[in-house]
Amino acid sequence: GQNIDQPTEMTATEGAIVQINCTYQTSGFNGLFWYQQHAGEAPTFLSYNVLDGLEEKGRFSSFLSRSKGYSYLLLKELQMKDSASYLCAVVRGGTYKYIFGTGTRLKVLA
Amino acid sequence: DAMVIQNPRYQVTQFGKPVTLSCSQTLNHNVMYWYQQKSSQAPKLLFHYYDKDFNNEADTPDNFQSRRPNTSFCFLDIRSPGLGDAAMYLCATSGGGAGVRETQYFGPGTRLLVL
């Protein structure tokens, strides 16, 4: 079967660091994407991992372990505007299709 | 700026009255996708085109159809909208290559309300 799991909700404080986990089981793997989605808006691209390891992009980093079927998104120096849903999506091998997780709703508190 | 455009942003229709949502892109991407997203849920892929090749998801209802007359435009037709079809409809595009070229770029979405 194919399954992507993320926590439903997380809460953190402005200025803190938060880690959002994603575990996946898919038939074939061709990369993992993280997207940010503010309420009522379209998802926007944050990061892409296809090899094991950490990809850093400013305040956001994403990690992948293919052997463990695991990824995380790390957000540093949280700002109020980071309050959004974060979607993990895996590309099935041999296709152009994403399998999305249900998303993690992050609330950043002052 | 190159982008994915969806019109209208908000659409109100009546139960059973056909409705068409449109998407256009200036990215010259090969692949175009239509997703349905309901509140607090993940986007659900309805179908996608690679160039003119249409790929339907097995669980997409027959009530949903799509057309892609050229590279730039793609339409979603809902033949007889039901109350359960009220949702955000997202159009996305990708280059159709490998790796990071599979990044999907989303339009702003059309929120459909069925009365």
Image (cartoon, coloured by chain):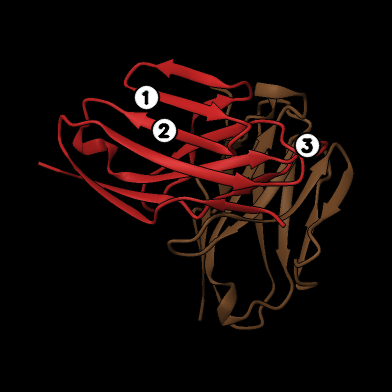
Chain colours: A red, B brown
Are the numbered discs 3 and 2 placed on the same chain, yes or no?
yes
The residue at the point 27 percent across, 43 percent down is A83
* Residue A28 in the figure: left or right of residue A31: right
In the orientation shown, which residue stands out farthest toward the left? A110
Point out the tag, 2 or 1, that comes first from the N-terminus. 1
User: Residue B71, how many percent across, how many down?
Assistant: 79, 34
- Quarter of the image where one finds residue A65: top right
Depth order, front residue of B73/A3: A3
In the orientation shown, which residue stands out farthest toward the right? B53
Depth order, front residue of B52/A108: A108
Q: Which mark is residue A73?
A: 2
The residue at the point 73 percent across, 41 percent down is A92
Point out the tag, 3 or 2, that comes first from the N-terminus. 2
Q: Which mark is residue A22?
A: none
- Give the foreground label among 2 and 1: 2
Helix, strand or loop at mark 2: strand
User: In the rendered view, would you say A95 is above or below A56?
Assistant: below
User: In the rendered view, would you say A85 is above or below A72?
Assistant: below
Q: Which residue position holds label 3?
A: A93
| Separation of marks 2 and 1 at Cα, in angstroms | 7 Å
The residue at the point 46 percent across, 50 percent down is A6
Q: Amino acid at mark 3?
A: Gly
Q: Which residue position holds label 1?
A: A60
| Separation of marks 3 and 2 at Cα, in angstroms | 22 Å
User: Residue B90, how many percent across, how many down?
Assistant: 58, 51
